[in-house]
Image (tube, rainbow, N blue to C red):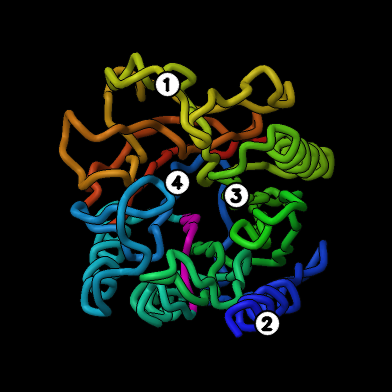
């Protein structure tokens, strides 16, 4: 009987597995008719909110911790309030969110996309799904369950178009947990007739397959080049699940042993017409991500820098910083970039 139950469950998990087709047009909700302007200062934020389920005292089983779901619905809602507050405090013009659940056992069924867009009414917005799991019965005694999740882009401008492009993932059993990685490319009009292509990215964290990571980066880099070739300004913001400073262990005085999501970002492979913005981040020594193997304790918990921005040369960085929320409700801190668009005619 047990074998029949296990066999039936395995058949259900693999039978329900699917990937969303590539090059999918996304539904856009416009709340503004504004265009961006050249030579004007703007602010962009990228923030992996960890589906609102990672307060500072949370540990996650896949990182060697304990829990698989948020403590409670109230805990998730407290996190969402804090995230909205962080956005309002920084007042960015563009926001790239990752790990935003629309419905999930792990996030106590809070619709986080609805929460963000309802409480940030000044922003146009678009959602790209990159996670839709069957009911995952692990850990066996406290299963993480079923979830739908994605990446969300907000702008204080008009959005003319947004497209979802799928990324390569593992093809073995681990695809059941990595599921449907993707990027979204959101096009924003600029007053000189060009567009800003805002790419929202969240690369795989737990894969040990370097070929998959290289293939994901290759597709992102290729999309960047395509957008630039069309004459657009290009900005890539998100969670890269790499060490974006390349030397985070030295910066944050941690162990030099690398985790699957802390390998140095291959800066040398970035297309020559782009640059990774890191000015001042090493000196500031504020991490963007923590490990979830233990509750957060400053100076003890392993931290790194996995989030940030890559921009085309016609995007002029002015300042980049981490808004230090001390991992109060997410295992990430938001990264904020001030920039201008060059008068590139």
Numbered mark located on residue 257 in the image: 1
Q: Which of marks 2 and 4 is in front?
A: 2
Magenta span covers which residues? 94-102
Residue depicted at x 72% and y 77%: 11
Quick one: 172 or 205, which is closer to the camera? Answer: 172
Numbered mark located on residue 8 in the image: 2
Residue depicted at x 82% and y 42%: 226
Disc 2 to disc 4: CB gap under 8 Å? no
Q: Which of marks 2 and 3 is in front?
A: 2
Q: Which of marks 3 and 4 is in front?
A: 3
Q: Residue 90: x percent and y percent?
A: 29, 52
First in sequence: mark 3 or mark 4? 4
Q: Mark 4 points at which residue?
A: 42
- Badge 3 local density, few (<14 within 10 Å), some, or many (20+)? many
Q: Which of marks 4 and 1 is in front?
A: 1
Measure the C-alpha gap from mark 1 to mark 3. Answer: 25 Å
Q: Helix, strand, or loop for circle 4?
A: strand
**Left or right: 159 in relation to 77:** right
Q: Mark 3 points at which residue?
A: 201
Measure the C-alpha gap from mark 3 to mark 4. Answer: 20 Å
First in sequence: mark 2 or mark 4? 2
- Badge 1 local density, few (<14 within 10 Å), some, or many (20+)? few
Q: Residue 100: x percent and y percent?
A: 47, 67
Q: Helix, strand, or loop for circle 1?
A: loop
> Is-magenta flag for residue 48?
no
Note whether 174 is above or below 323 in the view shown: below
First in sequence: mark 1 or mark 3? 3
Disc 1 to disc 2: CB gap under 8 Å? no
Q: Helix, strand, or loop for circle 3?
A: strand
């Amino acid at each position: 009987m047990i074998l029949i139950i296990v066999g039936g469950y395995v058949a259900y998990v693999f039978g329900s597995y699917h990937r969303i087709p590539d090059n999918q047009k996304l539904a856009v909700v416009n709340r503004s008719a504004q265009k961006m302007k050249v030579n004007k200062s703007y602010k962009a934020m990228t923030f992996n909110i960890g589906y609102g389920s990672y307060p500072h005292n949370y540990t996650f089983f896949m990182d060697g911790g304990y829990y698989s779901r948020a403590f409670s619905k109230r805990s998730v809602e407290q996190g969402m309030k804090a995230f909205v507050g962080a956005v309002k405090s920084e007042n960015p013009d563009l926001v790239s969110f990752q790990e935003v659940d629309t419905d999930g056992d792990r996030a106590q069924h809070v619709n986080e996309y609805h929460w963000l867009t309802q409480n940030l009414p000044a922003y146009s917005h678009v959602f790209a799904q990159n996670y839709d799991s069957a009911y995952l019965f692990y850990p066996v005694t406290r299963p993480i369950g079923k979830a739908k999740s994605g990446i969300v882009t907000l702008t204080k401008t008009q959005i003319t178009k947004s497209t979802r492009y799928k990324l390569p993932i593992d093809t073995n059993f681990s695809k059941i947990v990595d599921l449907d990685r993707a990027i979204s490319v959101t096009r924003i009009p600029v007053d000189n007739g060009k567009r800003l292509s805002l790419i929202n990215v969240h690369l795989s964290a737990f894969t040990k397959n370097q070929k998959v990571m290289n293939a994901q980066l290759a597709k992102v880099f290729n999309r960047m080049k395509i957008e630039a070739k069309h004459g657009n300004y290009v900005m890539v913001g998100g969670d890269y699940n790499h060490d974006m400073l390349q030397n985070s262990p030295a910066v944050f005085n941690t162990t030099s042993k690398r985790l699957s999501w802390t390998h140095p970002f291959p800066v040398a492979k970035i297309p020559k017409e782009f640059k990774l913005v890191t000015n001042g981040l090493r000196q500031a020594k504020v991490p963007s991500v923590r490990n979830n193997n233990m509750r957060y304790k400053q100076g003890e918990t392993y931290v790194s820098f996995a989030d940030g921005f890559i921009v085309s040369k016609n995007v002029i960085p002015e300042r980049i910083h981490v808004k230090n929320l001390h991992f109060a409700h997410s295992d990430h801190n938001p990264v904020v970039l001030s920039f201008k668009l060059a008068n590139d005619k």
